[in-house]
Image (tube, rainbow, N blue to C red):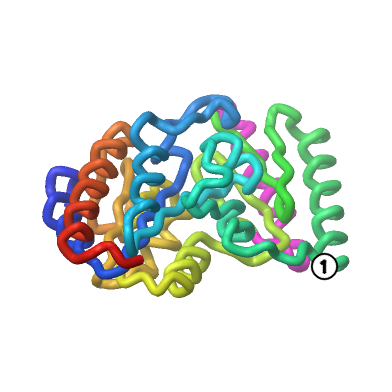
Amino acid sequence: MTGEGAAGPLERVAGAGRLLVASDFDGVLAPFVMDPMDARAQEGTTETLRALAALPRTWSAVVSGRDLATLEALTGLAGSAVVRIGSHGAETTRESGTGPTAEVADRLRRLREAVHAAVAERDPAIRVEEKPTAVVLHTRGLAQESVAVADEIAAEAATAEGVGLLTGKAVHELSVVRADKGTALQGLAGELGADAIVYLGDDVTDEHVFAVLGPHDLGIKVGDGETAATVRLTDATEVPGLLTRLQEQRAERVARSGSGR
């Protein structure tokens, strides 16, 4: 089903008793840019997520592969009612966390050393990002030869004990903790007692969410590629309008049913 056919599903899910609306950041709220740190949310996206979170029996969240500190800096959502989930679910504002164990910290140190050494020796053009529990290789805009080298480095690094590999669009994330967006969002929905989830995503990592959504939920794929989502938008420019329609319909439905949280 394409964006033109989203009206019915949006109206249905807007009437859920308790609703959670969540979205990926890059490629959905924010269009892709060459330098990931230049990414900014489109007008009418984070503002609408704030408006949704202010409604009774309604919550919103941004779920990203970005580390939590970077996600908050780019979205401007720090301190807001919008839940932020970073590092593919390894970090969240819903819990303080206890930090990595000594074993995990040592595993991360060895992973960082190995990846940096491999990149320096084999292709310094590959961009390396360090996260609290992961190391990321970025290849957006690089020549195919560099992409192939990054693929090899990631595959080799993932053979180390306790290291997992998550591959997305022009990115390889090597993590020393097990986390994915689907598990994180399911956990949040369970904690909130949500009756339905709306999730917007564009990347292969978002399929972890689409795969676990139930019949009362709504998955929205942004862009091309195979997906388990039931609605597809052409690109990120359609996202602000869709979120606005959902917020308006949700506000109308909760106004009819009463204001209790």
Q: Which residue is found at the position 22% from the left and 60% from the top? A: 254
Viewer-closest of 45 and 136: 45
Left or right of 150? Residue 51 is left
Q: Is residue 197 visible?
A: no
- The picture places residue 211, in percent across and down from the top left corner, at 38, 66
Quadrant of the rendering where the C terminus is positioned: bottom left
Viewer-closest of 17 and 102: 17
Three-letter residue code for mark 1: Thr
Q: Is residue 161 above or below residue 241?
A: below
Q: Quadrant of residue 78?
A: top right
Residue 155 lies in magenta, yes or no?
A: yes
Q: Which residue is found at the position 72% from the left and 55% from the top? A: 133
Left or right of 44? Residue 71 is right
Disc 1, SS: loop
Q: Which residue is found at the position 61% from the left and 31% from the top? A: 145
How crowded pointer 1 is (Cα within 10 Å; few <14, some 14-19, many 20+) is rated as: few
Residue 186 lies in magenta, yes or no?
A: no
Left or right of 117? Residue 60 is left
Q: Which residue is found at the position 36% from the left and 70% from the top? A: 194
- The picture places residue 14, in percent across and down from the top left corner, at 22, 58
Q: Is residue 80 visible?
A: yes
- The picture places residue 158, in percent across and down from the top left corner, at 70, 58
- The picture places residue 197, in percent across and down from the top left corner, at 34, 63
Viewer-closest of 152 and 134: 134
Q: Which residues are magenta?
A: 141-164
Q: Is residue 14 above or below residue 26?
A: below
Q: How many marks?
A: 1
**Residue underneath mark 1:** 101
Q: Is residue 172 above or below residue 147?
A: below
